[in-house]
Image: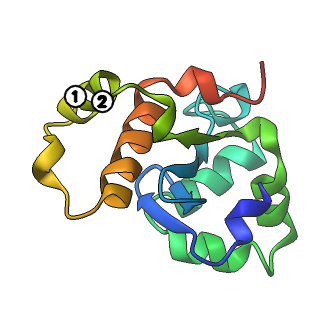
Amino acid sequence: MKNLLQPGIQCTDPDSLQFCLRISESEYWYCQPNIYHRDLFPGADTPAQRILCRYLGDPNDFLRDIHSDDEVRAFASDRMLWLEGEIDAADFSREEQEELLDAYGYRWESFFSDAERNQIICENHFEQYPLDYRNDI
């Protein structure tokens, strides 16, 4: 989870605290809170759920507070509370890439660069197959 502290980290969905870090033109690291973990179930009376609720929609404050709040840093460091992983668009065939793009209404030609297209391919895979990125099973 040290990637959350890296320069260049981007929030790709503030409402779910989804973050992305570009590793190469085709490879990206994604993470977001593991909503399948019992400590993050809606209505769970846990420190993790309270932190999640506090920062949903406010990723900049979350990233800032990782550095100054021990409880937030512990939440961000607990791999079990996060879905995360590296995804390389080059691992997918052209047909698979097009299917991932099409599932979100994109076409191959919708992008100005390969890197931009690859990021969306990786993001779509991360979102469509969240169980592949669990650290708690």
Frontmost residue, 63 versus 54: 63
Counting from the top left corner in percent of width and height, residue 10 is at: 50, 68
Counting from the top left corner in percent of width and height, residue 80 is at: 79, 35
Horizontal side, residue 131 vs residue 66: left or right: left
Frontmost residue, 49 versus 45: 49
- Tell me the quarter of the image containing the C terminus: top right
Q: How is the image coloured?
A: rainbow
Label 1: few (<14), some or many (≥20) within 10 Å?
A: few
Q: Which mark is residue 100?
A: 2
- Give the vertical position of 32 relative to 3 (above or below): above
Frontmost residue, 92 versus 71: 92
Question: Which quadrant would residue 42 be assigned to in this image?
Answer: top right
Mark 1 lies on a secondary structure that is loop
Horizontal side, residue 82 vs residue 29: left or right: right
- Indicate the amino acid at tag 2: Leu
Counting from the top left corner in percent of width and height, residue 9 is at: 57, 69
Q: Are marks 2 and 1 in contact (CB under 8 Å)?
A: yes
The residue at 46%/39% (across/down) is 89
Q: Which residue is mark 1?
A: 103
- Give the vertical position of 101 relative to 54 (above or below): above
The residue at 42%/43% (across/down) is 123
Q: Which mark is residue 122?
A: none
- Give the vertical position of 121 relative to 23 (above or below): above
Q: CA distance from mark 2 to mark 1?
A: 5 Å
- Give the vertical position of 132 relative to 117 (above or below): above
The residue at 87%/69% (across/down) is 70
- Indicate the amino acid at tag 1: Ala
Counting from the top left corner in percent of width and height, residue 31 is at: 60, 47
Label 2: few (<14), some or many (≥20) within 10 Å?
A: many
